[in-house]
Image: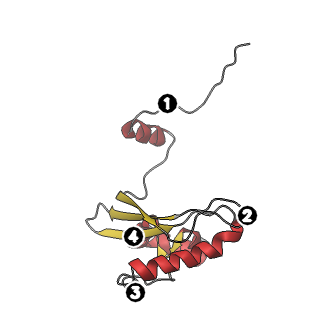
Amino acid sequence: PASSSSSSSPEVTDNAQFEAVLKGWGLSVYASYRTRRAKYTLPVEGEGESSEGLSTSTTVTVDLDDTRYPEGSGFTLMELEKVVDCPGRVGEAERALDEVVARHFAGLRDEASGAGRRTRGKLTEYIRRYRPGLYRLLTSELGKFRHLSAMAT
């Protein structure tokens, strides 16, 4: 038997079409910026397989985001990520990331936001700089804006 499916979403093939569809839905832009991301893989020593026989990540992913806002300013953020195979290994991954920071990025550690403290992500930083009323509303009245922060390492 033949099956058919229908979708209320139009097929979009490029950014201009996507923007036209969103505007057609009555949406408007409240933040606009461009990010150039470079991804690096950094090997981690002494890993491979857990005692349970599960494979573990032997690398740390380093993402370097260089963000340019239309107003001419910018924001650069480095993210470190280590994939784990179960929630019980998060602490181990955090310790591994701390070691990577100490070994490879110690000179950068205390600049800007400093390690171990919350830092704003790209969108949060944009809103803080260019939509201060919205930022105040989200941080003071709602108090739920913390989920858009990242932990600096």
First-in-chain label (1 vs 4)? 1
In what element is the residue under mark 2?
A: loop
Q: Is residue 102 above or below residue 16?
A: below
First-in-chain label (4 vs 3)? 4
In what element is the residue under mark 3?
A: loop
Residue 96 spot, x, y in % from top left? 54, 75
Distance (Cα) linking label 3 and label 1: 47 Å
Residue type (three-letter) at the residue carrying disc 2? Glu
Quadrant in which the N terminus appears? top right
First-in-chain label (3 vs 1)? 1
Residue 33 is at least partly visible in this image: no
In what element is the residue under mark 4?
A: strand
Q: Is residue 63 above or below residue 102?
A: above
Residue 39 is at least partly visible in this image: yes
Q: Nearer the viewer, residue 6 or 43?
A: 43
Q: Which residue is mark 2?
A: 52
Residue at x-position 46% and y-position 33%: 12
Distance (Cα) linking label 2 and label 4: 35 Å
First-in-chain label (2 vs 3)? 2
* Label annotation for residue 77: 4
Q: Which residue is mark 1?
A: 11
Residue at x-position 41% and y-position 70%: 78
In what element is the residue under mark 1?
A: loop
Residue type (three-letter) at the residue carrying disc 1? Glu
Q: Nearer the viewer, mark 3 or mark 1?
A: 3
First-in-chain label (2 vs 1)? 1
Residue type (three-letter) at the residue carrying disc 4? Leu
Q: Around disc 1, counting alpha carbons within 10 Å, would you say few (fewer than 14), some (14 to 19), or many (20 or more)? A: few
Query: Residue reaching furthest top?
Result: 1
Q: Which residue is mark 3?
A: 110
Residue at x-position 47% and y-position 42%: 22
Q: Nearer the viewer, mark 2 or mark 4?
A: 2
